[in-house]
Image (cartoon, rainbow, N blue to C red):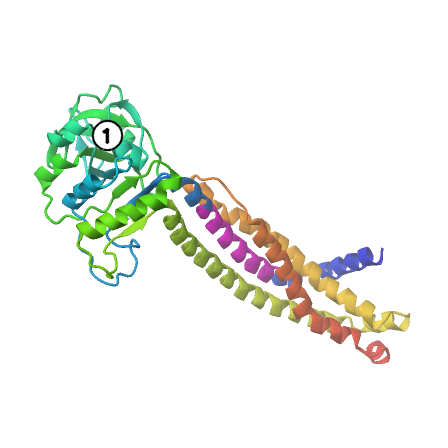
Amino acid sequence: MRFVETIREALTALRANKLRSALTLLGMVIGVFAVIASVTAVDVIDLYFKSSLQIFGPSTFSVERYAVRGGEEERYHPPITYDQVRRLEDRLDPDLTVSVQEGFDYNVPVRGARRKTNPNVTLYGTDEAFLNNFGYELRAGRPLARPDLQNARPVALLGATVADELFPTSSALGKEITVGRVRLRVVGVLATKGSFLGYDPDTRVFAPVSYLMSTYGGGGRNFGDVSVRAPGPEQMAAAQEQVRQQMRVIRKVGPGEADTFGFETNDSIRSTLDQFTRTLTIGGALVGLISLLAAGVGIMNIMLVSVTERTREIGIRKAVGAKWRDVLGQFLIEAIVLCQIGGAIGIVLGGLGGNATALYFDIAPSFPWGWALVAVAGVTTLALVFGGYPAYKAARLDPIDSLRYE
């Protein structure tokens, strides 16, 4: 009952100075809001990355020119040419499937008989193993076939968005389209994959890579998306080792020399993204920590003023038998109550603010419960640290001097 009464007294004291208490609360709310809003936004995006960024299947990996896309390059690596890709395919075991996906024209419109799309379509060259290796499915028609590649046929697979814009009321199969420099006949329409933070695989057109190379040229073009699919996830390590050995021979890498290529999987992409989101989380937490320290100084200020204003009250309490620990506890609880109210408001507003990211990108909301508990512990620590000195000062006041205070 004494504890409940002390909390009631603390709330009464805070209500007695509404403006001062509100300004102090504001600093605490801003600090906690900065922490929770930033980590919530990062958590929302991170969850979406993990659930949606499945560029490769569980048994598929990519052969890259450099080990880390966009990373620091220690030395020059020659391009991975289409000839090297075909030689790799010939050298690998039959149960390993190789496929390519290479962009030949970017941000171009696609023209049909009566309509055309926005200039946001990419024309890709690929092969007959494209669907399985790159995780696409057919909505209608047929996939690219080996004869399409061997005879360099001008045929195409349309992304779902492209097909719906060009042929909203009729089938796209068998229709003629023009993309960039080439005219193609539609043989298949791909199922919808959905956009990902501005990246939309449904605004693509795929044609036989042999036909596009005859039109756009191959030369020293680097094939950045070379996919290798193993029979199952358990064969991934062996498949990578076999590809590494063959690529070293094909690219004439000498014994003891470093590879002039690298591998990329879903796990490696997630690892890079985890580092990025971890940095964002730490940055947001540090900004919030600075705000919380400023709020802590405000708490110490309001508590010192409160001690001065209530000196006679403290003297009366001590005169009627209150011990120094009772006074100390009263002022500490006032500081803790003030911080917890500010922390609770900051957590709620931070969760709502962070999930504005989920609303904007139309993804599932999230809430960092772990960070909320950290925020609660943090504001309690602030109350004890910054409210401790004023509480100690109040507890050590001499009761006679306190009663004489004007």
Query: In this picture, is 345 found above or below 192?
Result: below
Q: Quadrant of the N terminus?
A: bottom right
The picture quadrant where one finds residue 108 is top left
Q: Secondary structure at mark 1?
A: strand
> Residue at 24% across / 20% down in the picture?
171
- Relative to the observer, which residue lies in front, 82 or 339? 82
Magenta residues span 25-46
Q: Quadrant of the C terminus?
A: bottom right
Can you give x and y, in whole percent of width and height, for residue 23 in the image? 61, 62
Can you give x and y, in whole percent of width and height, for residue 276 in the image? 41, 55
> Residue at 16% across / 37% down in the picture?
209
The picture quadrant where one finds residue 396 is bottom right
* Left or right of 60 on screen, residue 216: left
Which residue of the protein is positioned furthest toward the right in this rendering? 320
Which residue was labeled with disc 1?
Answer: 158
The picture quadrant where one finds residue 398 is bottom right
Q: Does the stretch in magenta take in 43?
A: yes
Which secondary structure dominates the residues rendered in magenta?
helix
